[in-house]
Image (spheres, rainbow, N blue to C red):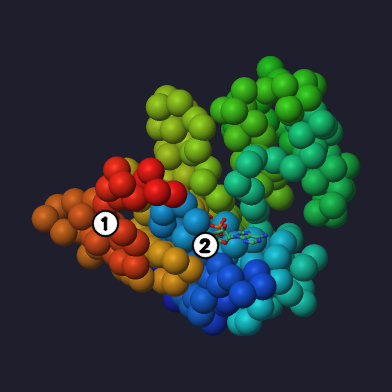
Amino acid sequence: MEGKSEKGMIEAKGLSKYYGPFVAIRDISFSIPEGQIVAFLGPNGAGKTTTMKILTGYLAPSEGHAFVAGLDVASNRLEVAKKLGYLPENGPLYQDMTPLELLRFFAEARGLDPDQTRERIDRITRQTSLQDVMEKPIDKLSRGYRQRVGLAQALLHDPEVLIMDEPTMGLDPNQIRDFRNNIRALGKSKTILLSTHILQEVEAVADRVLLVHNGALVFDGTPEELKEDGSLEKPFYRLTNEGRPVSITATEVTAQ
Ligand code: ADP
């Protein structure tokens, strides 16, 4: 990546997570340098959310370490929170609040003073076009608005690192286009990891793809390097179907 530093801004070192005997992720390692936009790609259940929750400090790994801007997230939660914006899978937390209340709450938690709070909330409200809904409860808003509230919360303190879990899920095509344009603009100054199971998303925004299947990293490279015969569909199918039945017959379905 020309002109971009090689310092790892998001790093996973040997991350594993077990739920009893079940292995949700195993031995995941990668390092994302400053300024990269990385798609964390994989089918449902592959381990994307688990990994992202560990990277953001919401979940403790069974093994390994996660670092943001060089800080171990397990032992530097407050410092990491200042440098990190996180959009969780189901949009913002605390959905009974209004966007204004939520943003004030997060501004306080991030240690912004009243002037900074006012200035940042004004700016982010305009950037995410939330002016009309600032005083309505989040759980009464449409999916697209809720997602924008989540993005506003993640961006409020102008973090260096953004981690987003399925950010375009539930958005309509116009909202998806606007969102992807936003991501590309944000990628000029931030390091971004976003999870998705949508191949077009990878082509539209990512410099690099991390592909996970059954809790393990099975590909790390550029979208171009992943492509076979000009398409991402074929390698995605091949790399994520090992160990699964290729087709289910009518008999097998009835037998279940
Ligand atoms: P993805 O985000 O790629 O869809 P997840 O990280 O949500 O995948 O899940 C990975 C696997 O771990 C799935 O099989 C899921 O059912 C399992 N899993 C996630 N959370 C728990 C939990 N709290 N207890 C047991 N299994 C879990």
Q: Secondary structure at mark 1?
A: loop
Image point (49%, 30%), residue name: 171
Residue 119 showing in the rendered view:
no
Q: Considering depth in this image, is 53 or 39 the residue closer to the camera?
A: 53
Name of the residue lying farthest toward the top: 132
Report, in whole angstroms, how far the alpha carbon at label 1 lies from the one at label 2: 21 Å
Q: Quadrant of the N terminus?
A: bottom left
Displayed-image quarter of ligand 1: bottom right
The amino acid marked with disc number 1 is Val
Q: Is residue 207 left or right of residue 106?
A: left
Callout 1: few (<14), some (14-19), or many (20+) C-alpha neighbours within 10 Å?
few
Give the residue pinned by disc 1.
Answer: 246
For ligand 1, tell me if the residue under mark 2 lies within 8 Å: yes
Q: Which mark is residue 47?
A: 2
Q: Secondary structure at mark 2?
A: loop
Residue 176, image x, y percentages: 44, 33
